[in-house]
């Protein structure tokens, strides 16, 4: 065989009896078949074998299988991010003329997709009060195809009565999808509570280090799996095996990170609760959070993100000064990583409440808690000396 041909021979030359604790990173688009009769193009690779790299390599399917196992799903699809997961669910369950319901506390880009892409496809997405519970039955129409839940909600942290919503939805033949990112798929058992599809932004707690973008969509049963799969194929939602490898490594430390984050976050939340400049603390484990009793009933723990509001007599420009004064907390979007983050929401829209630019979301990381509290305390002290400035008019999605 000519050396030029030898260079291109894909058959491994080294011994293949190597065993490791790490999942190998398989990169590849083309799947090589043993015979023409074996050639197939089937997105159901977990059931029928590999057909094309677009639907995942063994690294991708290993991550999917592990997420499915943790959540108790029939199967999981790994997608490029949380927003891709939202799109996959919308497009799998809704078509022109459909009606969907989404809580007004949902992730901002979900609402942006509802008002943009879905409206353009003639799908009406109606916002609803996240605390509606069983009352959602009154909003379900003949053409309602999907009900979204996100619990706790984005920024304002409302804990929804998911079982009551599921019961009302299923009584009328409507599917329920849950954004279960806050709970990392483990603090709230979506499928035990009747949800049809559970999504996570793996970018957050599973990735855990603010260095990858991935999402997951987990199907409760064969019916949900069959709904999602063809659209997953048609959208070409391929992901990087390298990112999947990072997520697999993140899973190995997920439990210990969640334990540390829960404890640290509760300590910071309790400190803020007693701070004289703070009006409300929206942490599911505190009675001041909407749906706290539901959290106690349905969740097995809390994680590392929550919000608080300053007193009404604190003008919005001073809240911005507070954020800018923080040293250890970094100003940034997203959450779930090992670094503490803070951001103010000057244009947060809630139909029942005007926060006046005084609501702040914190992501608590793995820094020493006493250092985090000292950082917050120093910034609080600076509020009283801050000069009034105009509140920024910028608005943005709730990542």
Image (cartoon, rainbow, N blue to C red):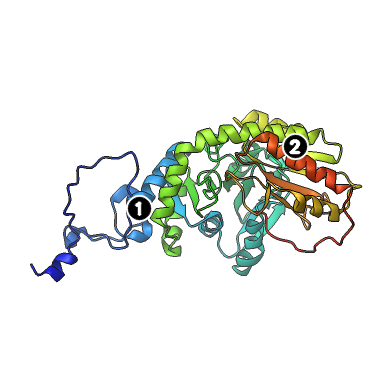
Task: Work out which quarter of the rendered image holds the N terminus and state it.
Answer: bottom left
Q: Which mark is residue 138?
A: none
Q: Quadrant of the C terminus?
A: bottom right
Q: Is residue 119 above or below residue 329?
A: below
**Mark 2 against mark 1, which lies toward the viewer?**
2
Query: Residue at 86% of width from left, 62% of height from top?
Result: 390
Pinpoint residue 53: horizontal percent, then vertical percent.
Answer: 33, 59
Which residue position is annotated with label 2?
289
Question: Residue 50: x, y in percent?
Answer: 29, 54
Q: Is residue 230 above or below residue 189?
A: below
Viewer-nearest residue: 89 or 377: 377
Quadrant hosting residue 293: top right
Q: Quadrant of residue 99?
A: bottom right
Q: Secondary structure at mark 2?
A: loop
- Check disc 1 and report the residue beneath it: 44
Q: Which of disc 1 and disc 2 is earlier in sequence?
A: 1
Q: Nearer the viewer, residue 19 or 216?
A: 19
């Amino acid at each position: 065989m000519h050396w030029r041909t030898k260079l291109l021979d894909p058959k491994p030359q080294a011994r293949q009896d190597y065993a490791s604790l790490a999942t190998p990173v398989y990169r590849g688009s083309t799947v090589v078949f043993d015979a023409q009769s074996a050639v197939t193009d089937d997105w159901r690779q977990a059931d029928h074998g590999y057909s094309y790299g677009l639907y995942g390599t063994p690294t991708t399917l290993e991550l999917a299988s592990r997420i499915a196992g943790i959540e108790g799903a029939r199967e999981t699809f790994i997608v490029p991010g949380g927003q891709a997961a939202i799109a996959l669910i919308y497009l799998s369950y809704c078509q022109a003329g459909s009606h969907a319901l989404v809580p007004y506390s949902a992730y901002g880009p979900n609402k942006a997709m509802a008002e943009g892409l879905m409206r353009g496809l003639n799908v009406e997405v109606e916002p609803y009060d996240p605390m509606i519970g069983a009352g959602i039955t009154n909003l379900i129409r003949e053409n309602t195809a999907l009900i979204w839940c996100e619990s706790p909600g984005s920024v304002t942290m409302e804990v929804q009565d998911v079982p009551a919503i599921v019961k009302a939805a299923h009584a009328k033949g409507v599917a329920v999808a849950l954004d279960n990112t806050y709970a990392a798929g483990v603090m709230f058992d979506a499928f035990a509570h009747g949800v049809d599809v559970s999504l996570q932004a793996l970018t957050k707690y599973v990735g855990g280090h603010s260095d990858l973008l991935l999402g997951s969509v987990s199907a409760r049963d064969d019916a949900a799996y069959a709904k999602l799969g063809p659209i997953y194929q048609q959208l070409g939602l391929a992901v990087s095996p390298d990112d999947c490898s990072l997520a697999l490594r993140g899973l190995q430390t997920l439990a210990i990170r969640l334990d540390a984050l829960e404890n640290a976050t509760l300590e910071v939340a309790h400190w803020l609760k007693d701070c004289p400049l703070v009006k409300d603390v929206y942490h599911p484990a505190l009675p001041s959070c909407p749906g706290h009793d539901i959290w106690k009933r349905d969740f097995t723990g809390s994680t590392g993100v929550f919000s608080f509001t300053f007193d009404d007599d604190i003008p919005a420009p001073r809240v911005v000064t507070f954020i800018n004064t923080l040293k250890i907390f970094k100003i940034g979007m997203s959450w779930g990583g090992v670094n503490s983050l803070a951001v103010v929401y000057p244009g947060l829209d809630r139909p029942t409440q005007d926060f006046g630019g005084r609501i702040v979301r914190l992501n608590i990381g793995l820094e020493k808690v006493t250092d985090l509290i000292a950082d917050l305390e120093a910034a609080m002290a600076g509020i009283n000396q801050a000069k009034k400035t105009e509140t920024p008019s910028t608005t943005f999605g709730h990542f």
